[in-house]
Every structure is written in structure tokens, then in C-alpha cells.
Amino acid sequence: MSAIRPTNLLATVRHLGLPRRTFVYLFLLNLLGAGLDLLGVVLLLPILEIIQAGGGSAIDKLQGQHWTILRNLSAQIGIPISLGLLLFISFTFVLARQFIRYFAVRYAETVQRNMANSIRARIFSRFLRAETVSQDAASVGSVVSILQSDLRRALDVLLSITQSVSLFAQIIAYFFGLFLLSPIMCLVCAVLMLLVMLASGGQFREIRKRGGAMTNVNQTLATFTIGRLRRARLIRLSGTEKAEAIEFRKITGDLADQELQQKMLATRVQFMIEPGVIAAAYLLFFLGAQMLGLSLERLGLFAILLIKILPPLRTSLAQYGRIVGMLPSLERVNGFLHKITKAAESKGGPLQFKRLDSEIRFRDVSYSYKSGNEPALENVSIEIPAYRLTALVGPSGAGKSTLIDLLPRLRDATAGQIEFDGVPIQQFSTESLRHAIAFVPQSPEMFDIPVEDHIRYGKENATDEEVRRAAQLAGALDFIERLPQGFKTPLGDGGSRLSGGQRQRLDIARALVRSAPILILDEPTSAVDPEAEADFRDVMIGLRASRKFTIIVIAHRLSTIVDADQIVVLNEGRIVEHGTHAQLMRSGGWYGVAHGRLFGVQSRE
Ligand code: ADP
């Protein structure tokens, strides 16, 4: 993505979903409002002239183009010109202007809110739908800082842009009034204003640079905070609270510095602009009075118009400062949205995957991570029979998780083919595949919700009976019933009220409630006591005996999988052996050695 410059800003904003017609409506509404205001102000000229002439019959003697127009209009509507009439009309214009402005503000506000909502929702949902590779690449800290601080600042830019469009319409209308009064003065005024803007150019560049620095510090802060909050236990155990707190203060101090400097720069620009604009106005006034010999009424009107033009001019310059200062954030939001939109994962093919009848087959499957040197999987060919229990074992880093990720298409094989009952994986819709695969991760993820709601996370509309049955099948019913509020007991943050083994069984219930034909379990490596380990094994045996599911277990404890129908041993991305426990023990390979080391028996079985 190329950097956003003020020149291609509108194109970017359109890309983010703010259509051109919104700007046109806003501009026209404000132009109409300012036009009505202008008419009200211009009417002050004949009003002042009437007052100057003393009113009554003197009105008929007043001369000028505007009087010809007024007399024509008065003849057409049949009401004689009087001071009261002109004052009344002028006031009506003011009222109409207020009305139009109200609608303009309401319109701008509605557009901004809708836009903010839509961008937020798009970023969130597209991130969830992006390929795993792109999700891996984005750190949680950077996504959070984009969704929070950058998005807020980017929306501020949009707000400033819509306000600038309104201000621009007002400035144009008042300039037109100035032009009617005196074209030369209008021209001189425009040149002077331009000079003031050019003089502030350097400051704007500086503001933009600071904006970029602030975006970076915001990201550092988000990454740091999330990382440390997640590992609060480790910090306490390592006794590094003080060092972490000092580092945190340093980053927040940096952020405060950057914020202060940007604010001061913006204020400085405002302080510089104000006298510049006022000096220009005085100069104009002087020119009008001394050199062009304008009448007092015209000069008065000129002064009123100048006074009207000043606030929108000053505000629009300040808005410009805000816009350039926050552009880096808009750039990041836009760039991120662009990237994750491009990385949308495939919806898959036209077939609906319903159930597995005979087998899942891997044919020469390889997978390489972008950042990895060695392939994580290399020429893997294996058959996983339906309604059986297949265990994947092997040392850490062997490629077990990568292999599992390929089944629900969280990743796509870089070479080779995966087939379900002989049909290539790409032909099934990704949604139907994921629906058919229930996954229990190594450390279950839990929100602080009641037990039954966690189980229903697997199937939203599951009945109480289904929830109960799933809990029973997962061996979780007994402990759930012993909880203070049974199925209604809140889990605590991350399931903190439960033991490691209980969390695992509850999560298996969540996976089972969906009755998905394929069940993948990543066995917990730690935080599980021997009793829980035995429970896990019992659950496994129960599930296998039901012959309802095709079960794949990533096993870290060899003891839990001796009953598996098939054990597949992976090492450095390759399948080194496979067979039943008895066969593998006989062959004397990695499995036999590892099992022997663990249980003190030699591979003799
Ligand atoms: P296992 O589950 O058997 O421990 P993994 O499938 O997690 O093994 O990892 C297989 C290999 O791929 C390892 O060498 C690991 O370092 C690498 N790997 C895993 N995840 C990533 C990733 N997101 N980016 C780069 N390399 C990865």
C-alpha cells in the first residue's frame, strides 16, 4: 500500500466505505445553509442604508443595483419595501439556515457512526476469516492497537474530513459574498489566506511525522501490556515485577511525551494561524477603506463577512492539522483491512461434508511454514480409518499439530493431497468440513461463563438433555454435579475454578455435543495429575468403544494410547513408523524405545 497523502486521502476514505455521494450531499447541504446565511447578511446592506437615510419616503430615493432588484421583487409580490419587512426576511433566512445546518450535522453524525461501526465490524470479521498464515503473522498486540487506538484516530480523521467539507462549503459561500461586494478585495483576501496556509506547511509536516511516531508507541504499549498480563504468573515467579513496571512506565511515558508534543504542535499552529488570519483581515479592511473608497455600509457588510469567514477558516486549518497528524493511523487501518481482505481464506468447493464412511487419506502431503527452513511435514502418506482411534505420537516439533491443522483447512498442504472417502479436501465447503470436525485443544480455552454455556459453545441450540449426555460421555457429569450450582456454575476467567483434568473433560463435552463425525483431541501435556491421566484414558476408551466417531488423538503420554487402533509415529515431519501398540513394541523403533524408557520395560511385547 502506498502512503496516504492529502491528495489521495479521499480515494482512501472511499475505499474504507465512505462514498463520494456522502461528500456531495454534505457539501450541498452546507452550501445551502451558508447561502441562506449569506442572503440574511447581504440584506443588512439595504437595512443599513434605510437606517442611514432615515426611512419613510427616503427609501424610494436609494440607488444601486441591489435596490433595482429589491424594487422588482417587491412589485411582483405586491408588498412595499420597509425596514420591518427586510428585517423579517433577514430573520427568516437565519431560521432557514439553522434548520438546514441541523440536518447537515445530523446527516454527518449518522454517516460517521455508521462508518465507524462498519469498519470495526469489517476488521474484526475479516481478521477471523483470514488465512491462518496471516493470523500467525499479525501479533495480538498490533491487532488490538489497530482496533483500538488506530481505529479511534482513523475515525477522527473521517470526522475531520466531513467537518472540513462542511467548512469548505461555508467558506466558498462567504467568499462568493465578498466577491459580490468587491471582486478585487475577494481576490486579495484569497491570496492572503493562501499565504497563511503556506506559511504553516512546515508545521503540518512535523505534525504528520509525530503522528507516525505515536502510532508506533501505541503499538508497543499494546503488545507489551497484553504479553505481560498473559504471563503475570511467570513474572511473579521470576520476581521481575519491578523491572516490568519500570519498563511499562517508560513506554507510557514515551506515549505521554508524544501526545504532548503533538498537541503542542497543533496548538502552536493554531496560535500562529489566528494572528495571521486577523492581520490579513485588518489589511483588507484598511485596503477597502483607504484605497477602494467603499461606502460605510459596504465596509460594514464587508467586516461582517470577514468575521463570518474567520471561524471556518481557522477551524479548517486546525482540522487539516488534525488530519495530517492522524493520517498514519488511517494508513495502518486501511493497510491492515486491505491485507486481511486479500488474505480471506478459501470457502472451499461445492460439496457438503456430512460423514466419513471409510477413511481419511494423506497422499504425499508436505507443508512448509513461510518462516521455517525445514518443511514441517514431508511426504506424509497415511490412512486414518473411519470409526477407529488413531494416535499421533512423536517428539515435540515433529509436525503433529501441523498435520492436524490441515484437516479443517486451517492450513493448506503445500504439496500432496488429502482425501475424505476418496474425495479431495478442496471439493468440500470449508464450513461443512469444520462443522464435521470437533477439536479439543491441549489447553482448553474458556470464557467466564456457566458450565452449560461452555458445552453449548459446540452447539448453540443443544437441549439440556444433549448437554447432559455429552457431559456424561466425556466423563464430566460427576464433577459437574458436585459443583455448587451444577451446570450453572460460572467457570471463572479461563476456567480457573476447575482443575486441569476437569477443564479437559468439560472441553471434550463441548466437542461431543455437536455429534461431529470426526473428533480430534490434543492430549494435555501438563497440569494433569495421574488420576486425570487415567480418566482421560477411560474417556478415550469409552469414545472408541461407541464406534460413533473417527478419533484422532495427539498423544504426549504414551500410556493413554496403548488401546489405539493405530499409532502413527512422526519425527521431523516424516512418518517413521505406524501400527498397533503391540506391533510397534515388536519393531523396536522410536515408539518401543520411548515407551520402554517411560515404563522401564524393554520392547518385548
Ligand atoms: P508438534 O505438534 O509435533 O510439536 P508442530 O506441528 O507444532 O509440531 O511443528 C512442526 C515444525 O514446524 C516445528 O519445527 C516448528 O518449529 C515449526 N512450526 C510450527 N508452527 C510454526 C509457525 N507458526 N511458524 C513457523 N514454524 C512453525
Image: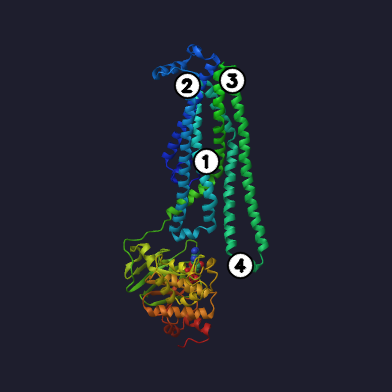
Q: Pick whichever of labels 1 and 2 is earlier in the sequence.
A: 2
Decide which of 329, 578 is in the foreground and name it: 329
Q: Looking at numbered disc 1 in the image, what kind of residue is underneath it?
A: Ser
Rendering coords of residue 565 (x, y %) = 40, 80
Rendering coords of residue 102 (x, y %) = 48, 37
Q: Is residue 580 visible?
A: yes
Image marks 4 and 2: residues in contact by CB distance under 8 Å: no
Q: Nearer the viewer, mark 4 or mark 2?
A: 2
Q: Nearer the viewer, mark 3 or mark 2?
A: 2
Q: Is residue 600 above or below residue 59?
A: below
| Ligand 1 is within 8 Å of the C-beta of the residue at disc 4 | no
Residue at the disc numbered 3:
287
Decide which of 578, 69 is in the foreground and name it: 69
Q: Looking at numbered disc 4 in the image, what kind of residue is underneath it?
A: Arg
Decide which of 318, 417 is in the foreground and name it: 318
The residue drawn where x is 66% and y is 59% is: 245
Is residue 331 toward the left or the right of residue 210 in the image?
Answer: left
Residue at the disc numbered 4:
233
